[in-house]
Amino acid sequence: MYSSVNKFKIVIFKFIPIIIFITFYLIYSFVFFKEFPITTDEQARYEWGRDQLDYFKNSSYLQTFIKPDQEPDTNILYPTILNILNPNFYYEWFHLQNLLFSSIAFVSIYFLCYMYSKNPHLSIIGPVFLFLTPNFSGMIASNPIDIPFAVVFILNIFLVYYFKNRGFDFGKILILGFSFWPLISIRPVGAQIFLHYIILTLLFLPSKDKKIYLLLELKYLIFIGFVSFFLMAISWPYLGINFFKNYPSILLTNAKYDKWDNTILFEGVKIPGVESPWYYLFTYIGYTIPLFIFVLFVISLLKIKDKLKAFLLYVLSFNLLIYLLLDPLIYNGMRHFLFIVPLIVSISCFGFFDFINSTSFKKLKVLIFVGIFASILWTLYEMVNLFPNHYAYFNEISGGFRNNYLKYETEYWGGSYKMAAEYIRDNLAIGNEDLKVSSCFIGFGMQYYSKGTYEVVMKESNADVKVCDVVSEMGESNLGEVIHEIKLHGVTFVNIRKNK
């Protein structure tokens, strides 16, 4: 008994950095979860989850909440689980749940760094750098679609590497089967994990008994696939109806998601989303990933002997190649490819380890360290000024948010409308019980934050006050008098106007 306690203490002390990080992260989550705004996709996702939960509870065969002809690729397991823990449908509680769930990504990237560096203390830069990547960490609270997928993606990348060469292990089959389940469910593109498992198997192919080894690993993969697909079928009613017919249709629909026909802001011009150029994703990667991450990523490419680094580079390259080949419709920046951000950050951390262990270019090292530190300060400055909408971050290469909010998709989530809603509630609605407000965006969020002090109306002609962001007002004329301006990082982003 004494020996077990002693070993436990040794493990705790060894991994004290990640324990401290998660402790601070939990404090951050509980202190700030009410500050994060409602975003545009939240209402539909949480309501679908509530409906599916009701379906499971009532065991009805009627699935009125599912629209297979319109959304066959949509899995709502995650928001269903959130509704179990939040029956009163408070958005703030959803945000807290999202924050807590996302801690898995920080733990996963820490242990990826540990497997590479073998240094439990230095590996803490993994979760720190991921937190300092605002286009990821800024979306954690209010993105119930892309962030959960990104979280389980990096978790599974860690797990398949951790369980490599384990031989027959019933625990491995169950753990990977259960971890593959949400990955292949939330987004069908998650099925790529089976290919990555095979590639990793080949990467660690032994010099003897290769055929036996490959057959055994294939057997394990079949067992893992059976567990994960079985769990997906029983938790996704649309698949449960007819798995072999509906799953291929889901894959085909997801391969080129072309139902979305809104306009996007790109290079200062509003264009149809279907007309986004091939370099759309690469532009957002280049402009929204912090510069210090890029510098370390390039340094990491100078030495690719380690198999873990080679594996992560392969997974990243695979997804970028798929993007180029399939040319899928993506919009709202790089939100559909947020799952590659932890990969980029992980590879950058490997570059940091390589850099500090290098004995070459000592004078150049000082300059690079100064540059990295300056970039981290810039990122922190931008994050603080944009908080809690720091998902709108643009890096120093692009000139920051203020240089890009009229050029690219920055505040497409509608989070800044929360400030407008609260201003109207606390100022304009006082003594004016019949006040009617129209909103260019996220009207349900405006209504939620009104707390019943004013009414959000659908028809603009019925409104006394109109709320609109400057991007939506681009090209508009004959606008009403500005009552109040909502500023984001010192620039006007949302106008509250008298309705003409």
Image (cartoon, rainbow, N blue to C red):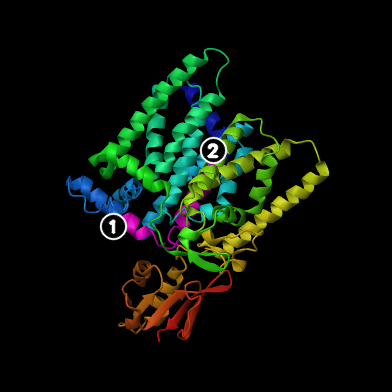
Q: Residue at x 25, y 44 (%)?
A: 237
**Residue 225 place in picture, x, y as percent:** 37, 30
**Residue 348 place in picture, x, y as percent:** 63, 43
In this rendering, the label closer to the viewer, 1 or 2:
2
**The stretch drawn in magenta includes residue 108:** no
Give the distance between the C-alpha atoms of the residues marked 1 and 2, in whole angstroms: 40 Å
Report the residue that reaches farthest toward the top.
209
**Residue 461 place in picture, x, y as percent:** 34, 82
Q: Residue at x 68, y 48 (%)?
A: 295
Q: From the viewer's perspective, is 73 left or right of 334?
A: left
Q: Secondary structure at mark 1?
A: loop
Report the residue that reaches farthest toward the right.
363
Q: Residues within 10 Å of mark 2 (few under 14, many from 20)?
A: many
Towards the viewer: 201 or 78:
201
Q: Which residue is mark 1?
A: 88
Q: Which residue is mark 2?
A: 315
Q: Is residue 116 above or below residue 435?
A: above
* Image disc number at residue 200: none
Q: Name which residue type carries label 2.
A: Val
Q: From the viewer's perspective, is 108 left or right of 56?
A: right
- Counting residues from the start of the chain, the first of labels 1 and 2 encountered is 1
Quarter location, residue 122:
top right
> From the image, which quarter does the N terminus lie in?
top left
Towards the viewer: 354 or 9:
354
Report the magenta residues as a range.
18-47
Residue 119 in view, yes or no: no
Q: Name which residue type carries label 1.
A: Asn
